Amino acid sequence: MNVFPRRLKILVLMLCALVELSSAQAPPPSSTYLKCGWLLDGKSDQLQKDVIVVIDGENIQPIGAAGASQVPASQVVDLSRETCLPGLIDTHTHILLQGDITAADYDEQLLKQSPEYRTILATVNARRALMYGFTTIRDLETEGAGYADVDVKKAINNGVIPGPRMQVATRAMDVTGAYPLQGYAPNVVVPHGVQIVDGVEDGRKAVREQISHGADWIKVYSDRTYSVRPDGVLDDIPTFTIDELRAIVDEAHRERHKVASHAMAIHGVHNSVAAGVDSIEHGNYIADDDLKTMASQGIFYVPTIFVGDYVARGRAATGATVWLQMMSIHEDTFRRALKAGVKIAFGTDAGGFDWKIDPAKEFADMVKFGMTPGQAIRAATSSAAELLDMQDKVGTIVAGKFADIVAVPGDPLKDVTVLEQVDFVMKGGVIYKKP
Ligand SMILES: [Zn+2]
């Protein structure tokens, strides 16, 4: 039965024709125009003045494709007093941690908080990361919260909660007796912050297991127990044997996944580099020969400077004064790595410090240790994208890539700390924060 009166039907048809006519003249309603006072596209260190970035759906359109005069005001975002730059990338985070200066802080999270509660906190941290301007993160293990990172990533990708694009490492690996929780009576069963793996076959099996449950990256802890030698070199006890590390790396690469290695000192770094990992995390001390190998093989260095400074004072207060000496050793290593031409990606270890602190503080430390602001910004954009194999999707403001764009009220090439004041955040064409 036709319930529409004839006259109403004609009216509806006329309205439809009108809508069609107007939409043919106006740009598609999904287009957004960012009127940037200055643009740092991530390819060069030169600011471009007065640029309009056109976004259609979730992608960037060819720069300068539309004249500003034809653009309807409702679709323009006025950032004329701001510098636009690619969304920032933090390649070393822990959204399931809330800061752990001392062993007691860490133990309490694993002993007194359920994985479910920790996951709720993680969703808040993911949102914080995005609001700080980090539109992509590599989250380097859940610290005892199993595969919760895979679910947070899924919830973000499904549009359930706001957060950055994520690559996740799930449980990470270390050997028996090397990773907290430690020091409890032998008859007390305690949780561990990693999957305990001993032996070559165990290593391969753990890689298969973690990848099957959603790991994008495999994370290994390659050293522990640090001390400064009389010659100033940072010493350590390696965890895995070189054979174990080689098997883990081989299995991960065979399955086309990359390996990140926590390696802070001489032996851990050397074994990791020899085993062919893809990134060295922290690297407080790296021998010159290993820097040379890293440069020639394209192994990334993710220095995480800020967290070292942040935890040093707390850990020194509990007697571990080695953490204070590590800062100057770290600076020397960073400067040698720069000179050796090692690829450096921005990573902070956020979660190792409280998420209420903006991880962008790392930029100032990188500049203090010898990078130009432009180099530090590229470490957090195009270089980080390369480490994540996402260089065709993010890391520069170029046509066809995801519209992941942030803006700051100043010139980050003059004062890199302005990156701690990100006041505009767009991810995949969706605006999450506006000045
Ligand atoms: Zn970490």
Image (cartoon, rainbow, N blue to C red):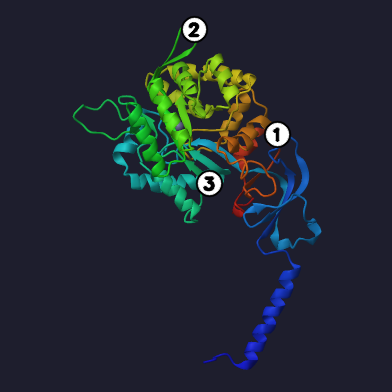
| Mark 1 touches mark 3? (CB < 8 Å) | no
Q: What residue is pinned by disc 2?
A: 231
Q: Tell me where residue 57 sits by quadrant.
A: bottom right
Label 1: which residue?
A: 413
Badge 3 local density, few (<14 within 10 Å), some, or many (20+)? many
Residue kind at label 2, given as amino acid type: Asp
Res. 359 image quadrant: top right
Ligand 1 lies under 8 Å from the Cβ of mark 2: no
Q: Earlier in the sequence, mark 1 or mark 3?
A: 3
Q: Is residue 410 left or right of residue 150?
A: right
Q: Residues within 10 Å of mark 2 (few under 14, many from 20)?
A: few
Secondary structure found at label 2: loop
Q: Amino acid at mark 3?
A: Pro
Q: Residue furthest top?
A: 230
Q: Is 381 positioned to the left or the right of 106 in the image?
A: right
Which dot, 2 or 1, sits closer to the camera?
Answer: 2
